[in-house]
Every structure is written in C-alpha cells, then in structure tokens.
Amino acid sequence: MTEVLFPQLSDEDPNGEGVLATWFVEDGATVAGGELIAEVMVGKVTSEVHAPAGGAIHLAVHEDDVVRQRTVIATIS
Amino acid sequence: MDNGLRLSLYRTMVLIRVFEEAILREYHADKRPAFDIGAGLVPGEMHLSAGQEPVAAGVCAHLTAGDAVTATHRPHHLAIAHGVDLDRLAAEIFGRETGLGRGRGGHMHLFDPDTHFSCSGIIAEGYPPALGQAFAFRRQGTDRIAVAVTGEGAANQGAFHESLNLAALWRLPVVFVVEDNDWGISVPRSASTCVTSNAIRAAGYDMPGERVEDNSVEAVYEAAGRAVGRARAGEGPSLIEVHTLRMWGHFEGDAQAYRTDLEGVPGRDPIATYEHALRSAGLLDDGRVKTVNEDAVARVEAAIAFAKSSPEPAPETATEYVFA
Amino acid sequence: MTTTETPATTAPAPTASGRRLTTAKAMVEGIAQEMERDPSVFYLGEDVGAYGGIFSSTTGLLERFGPDRVMDTPISESAFLGLATGAAVEGLRPIAELMFVDFFGVCMDQLYNHMAKIHYESGGNVRVPMVVTTAVGGGYSDGAQHSQCLWGTFAHLPGMKIVVPSTPYDAKGLITAAIRDDNPVVYMFHKGVMGLPWMAKNPRATGPVPEEPYEVPIGKAAVVREGRDATVVTVSLSVHHALDVADELAADGIDLEVVDLRSLKPLDRETVLASVAKTGRLLVVDEDYLSYGLSGEIAATVAETDPGLLRSPVRRVAVPDVPIPYAHPLEYAVLPTRDRIREAVHQLVRA
C-alpha cells in the first residue's frame, strides 16, 4: 500500500494547513502511476498531485477539506 | 523643506500604510484556510498600495480638494492622501450602502465628487477623464488642476499616448504621474517597455518629464511641485515618473512566483527609510513614532468599524442609479 | 495566405475516458496538443508566460514551448490583437488572449473592423485563422468592469465565430476546433467554470476528458439533459445552474430539457427549435445583459419560425440592463442564479 501525502508547499510553515481543492478521481477508482489525482492549495500556492503508484485509490479526505501539509490524503493498493 | 511639512508627509504615509494593513487583515480574515476570492466581508479582487505611499503623499500635498485626481485599480493611497473621507472609503470597500458608491462600485471604482477623486479598473483609461476635468476647470476660470495617475504598464496603452498628445496640444492643466513599481502583474518593465524611463517619452509629447528614481517622498514632493506649478500657471502638462515599490502582490492571492526581487523588498520600505531620515534629523523619536502610529490606527479602525456597522444595500435596489 | 489540412478526428464520446480534468486544464491540454502538432500556432497576451494566465489558461505552456511561442505582451491590446490579425493573414495561427472581455473597449476596432471583416472585404481572398481567448463572467465581486459576459455584443457583429464552453470536455474540443478553423474564433471562457482552486466552483467544472486530440464542432449545440416539460436554452456557467435546478425540480415532477448552445456564432437554431417543438415551453438563461442580446435572439428564432410551438410566452432570465454591482447582495440580485431560474421555470409551467 502506498500513501499519498498532501505536499509541503510552504517552507515558512511546514506544518501549516491547506485545502484539498479538487479530486480528479473517485474513491475506489483504478489509477495509473503518474496520473493526475488532485489539486491542492496552501495559502495562494496551488499544486497538482500525481499518483505515486498504480492501483486502487482510497480517498482519505473530501474536496474542500482543510488538510495539514504532509498528512495522508489517500492510499493506493 | 519645512519640518512641519516633512512630518505631515510622514503622517500621511503612515495613515495609508495602516489603512492598507487593516484592509489586508480584513480581506483575508474570512477567506481562510482556503482562499476563496468571492468570500467574506471584503470580496473580489484587492490591489493594495503598500510601498507606493511616497507618490501619493508627495503629489497630493500640493493639491486642494478642488483639484481632480484619477487613479487606477490600486487607488487607496491616492484617495487617502487626497482627502477622500476614510469612513465612506472603507464602507465602499466593504460594499455598504454608506460607501462612496452605495456599494455598487467597490474598491476599483471609487468616485468622490467632494474631492474630485475617481478611479477605474481599465488600464490607462483614467487619463482621458482627467483631461476633461482639467479642461472644465480652465473653462470655469479657475487654477484648479487634474492629476492623472497610472502604472508603468499603462504607458504602453493607447489612451496614454493619446492623452499626452491632446493635453500638450491644448495646454491642459494636467500632471501625469506614472508609478513605476517594476511589475505589470507578472511582467517586468524590461519585457513590456521599449524605453528605460517614461520621462523620455514626455519629450515626444512636448512636455517636461522627470523621473524620481528612489521612491523618496521629498523628491516626489519637489518634482510634483514643479509640475503642479506649471499647470496652475497655464503652462500646460508635465509628466513625472516615480520608481516606486509594490511591496505586496499585484492582487491579494497573488503567489508572486514570477517575482525575482522579493528578498530585497522589506529593506526598501519607503516609510522605514523616511522614518530613519526624520529620526536622524531629530524630528522623530520613539514617542512621536508611536503617537503617529496610534493616531493612524485609531482613525483607520474607526473607519473599519463604521463600515462594518453600516447596512448592506438591499437586493431590490440593485437596478437603481443606472440613470439620473 | 493560409490553407489548412485538418486532421480527420471524430469526437470521442465524453464518457469513453475515465480521466478527469478541470476546464482550465482541459483548455490548456487542447492548446498544447495543437501547438505540438502545428508549429505555426503561438499564444500571446498579458501574463500568459510565467504567470500561466490570470485564470490558468496557459499554465505550463511557457515551460513546454518557450518564449518564442508563448509570449507576454505589454498592456497594448490594440497593438497585439492587431498584430495577431496581421500574422494570421500571413499564414501563422495566433491565439491572442484578451485578459478580461471587459477590456474589449480598448481594442475592439482591431477585432470587429479588421479581424472579422478582412475575409469578407477581400471577397474571400484573404483568411484570418486566429483565435481570441478571453475570460468572462462574474459572481465573485469583481465589479462592473471585470464581471461581464458580453457575448451578445460580440455575436451581434458579423465575421467572428463565437464559442463558449461550459465543460472540460467541450473546453478542449472547442479550443482545438477553434485553432484549426481558418476563421477568426472568439473563445469565451467563464472564470466560474474553470475549476480554479481559489474561486468557488461547481462540481461540473471537473469532468472526463479524452487524452487524444479531438474537436467539438463549432456551431452545434448539445442537449445536455433530455426532458419533456420545458426547454432551458443557455450557455456557460448557467448550464451548470440549469442542470442543478433540473435535478432539484425532477423531484417535484418537473422534467426540464437543457440545451447548452456551446456556440453563439454560428447559432444552432435547429436544436433549439426541435427542443421547443417537443416541450412547448422556452426559458432562456443568459448571464449577459437582457436587452438586445442572446436571449432575444433565441426568442426571435422561435417567434419567426413558428410561434405556435409555444404553449406559453418565452421567459428570459438575464442581467437586467444594469452595470454589475460590486456588493455581494446586489451582484447576486442581478445574476441569473438558481433561485431566479427555479422561479422562472415555475412561472413557465404554471402559465
């Protein structure tokens, strides 16, 4: 099982919160390694999140949820 | 320069900065943690003028309420320096019925007939109306003038060039002010402008042009004095370009990833620089600095409180004021 | 001058791919694939380079194609839109971005008198294969000069094709078709459908987008929801709102058909008429100003073809001829919100 982490976008506040702005896949979907799965935002900085591995993805947070950087947002098995 | 004037310039700049910091606070307060541009008590785009205070203070010190000022999408410093009522300015930014535009214009479309102040969000399009105000003032037999302010990016827009030519041709009592803060959103001047200074372009329009290089409020004051004097004496328009500083983003929410000069910005704060100069001259000390700051905070917080306690416009009045 | 050989592509069905993108990313992908395929395509506008477009219309393109093909311009709309016209005349295929459609005032001559008329004035001898992309729409308190739609104004003037995507699938397909079209095409993207993280978004701003290049035909509307009781004709963000209202009203036994025009010029009048013939009731939802525009054009289409198709008068929900107000309660009183759409449908089916 591979964990997908909310990226660290802020150097000044590495434990700060951001938001999961958009999920591009549904819970349970099969994703390919490298596939675009989410877009996140910390403050004014946005970033794409790509699947670190292929497999079935289980989403741990919802769209618009506030999420701390470097916490698990999904797992792929 | 008269010491009273120097302190007055300092106070104006501090008032502006305190206001912009308060708006910054209010703007972001209810947009966390996810920035949603349309959310909160102050929604929409927000373009703040921190760093550009010397332009407003230095130029507007020569003006009275009867002189016109046209400004841009980044207008607060000019509105404040020119004497627009702080309460009604804040209320308009908060979209309230007691605002300058009854909540209909918002922060980029401020109109104050009492001080002949206006601004708009279309680049360079504040220049032509300033010509008209100057034209009217002269026709009405006064020595009132119009000051038209844009950024350096606007100097590449058609209306800028048409306005300079027409103002010179008709010898209108206008002062053109260009705030060169180095960035047109994400585009540096070197990538947008074929000349290194718009003061050069003034010569192409048969008017004097001066560039103030160091964002110094006293240098701005001196240059503006010359330009305003010419205009009032019927000698026609002038152009002043000030190399100023955009301390924050183009708009709030701008991550400024494109910006290569961010590290140096705090060290270039013009208010800190001027405070240091006035301290060295014995005009400011800790006590006085504190008093100026507290006075500004009191005025600004009163304006914010006025705005927040004012009623929102009623939805059923949305189509009123289209026509007189 | 310009000739083009369009690759033959039939548009894949929207559900054939599981991959999802936001409208912004789909638009960028369409542009990137065309720039890859055709070296004569280039993109110019304000803040389209390092910034990636104020509304993410060009994110990543500068890194991929370099500053010779993705060019930041000065704030000189007349000059660079006119430049695009001249470049197109001489065989390049420019995409020029007008940052906000509200800025058209400073450069409209280059668009409506030059870009749009050269082909006609030359008796068909000169082509202008260019695209003008532009951000439209309000709902986030950007005020009177930054919130307009104005497609009625553009569509009124001859010589320009006008496309308005509402979904990621259409965004990619229409930008591809627009770039390949040998005519001037104005591509108007609503900021609220782009799926931007920093602006409130409808879930329909994300959707399936095939990975391969494909076109959505210009001039063809889409029936995005079939129904029996009334036809809602609309475009852009209002499509999402109409679908939301349709979902709600289904529970009340009101079955709406929703037509997404997708193109305003050419206008797919046949699809509108076929739908009204089926339902007998017409509501036009238009975020542009009410009078002298799109909604009147749709009503006239029915009235001059066969007013007998209608069981009740046409209803229009649009912005009521007022500058878009800044204050939130005022802005939302004039926009074509779900509340206004729902109310209009109720009046329509009761009449």
Image (tube, coloured by chain):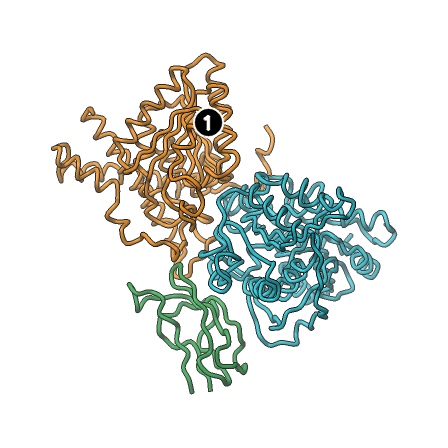
Chain colours: A green, B orange, C cyan
Q: Quick one: C342 or C67, which is closer to the camera?
A: C67
B145 sits to left or right of C40: left
- Tell me how many marks there are: 1
- The residue depicted at 51 percent of the width and 56 percent of the height is C68
Q: On the rendered structure, is B199 left or right of C288?
A: left
- Does A17 sit left or right of B278 as displayed? right
**Nearer the observer, B88 or B243:** B243
Q: Measured from the top left, where is residue B127 in percent x and y?
A: 48, 31
The answer to whether residue B96 is seen in the rendering is no
What residue is disc 1 on? B205
The chain that hosts pointer 1 is: B
Mark 1 crowd level (few <14, some 14–19, many ≥20, 10 Å Cα)? many
Residue at the (42%, 23%) spot, across then down? B237
Q: What amino acid does circle 1 point to?
A: Tyr
Seen at 22% across and 42% down, the residue is B272
For the residue pair B98 and B42, the one nearer the viewer reads as: B42
Seen in the picture, residue C81 relative to A72 is either above or below; the reply is above
Specify whether residue C40 is in view. yes
- Quadrant into which the N terminus of chain B falls: top left
Dot 1 falls on a residue whose secondary structure is loop
Q: Quadrant of the C terminus of chain B?
A: top right
Residue C95 point in image, percent of width and height: 59, 54
Image-quadrant location for residue B32: bottom left
Up the image or down, C102 lies above or below A76; here it is: above
> Residue shown at 57%/39% (left/top)?
C106
Residue C47 image point, x, y percent: 48, 52
Q: Residue B12 in the image: x percent, y percent?
A: 28, 33
Q: Nearer the viewer, residue B267 or C7?
A: C7
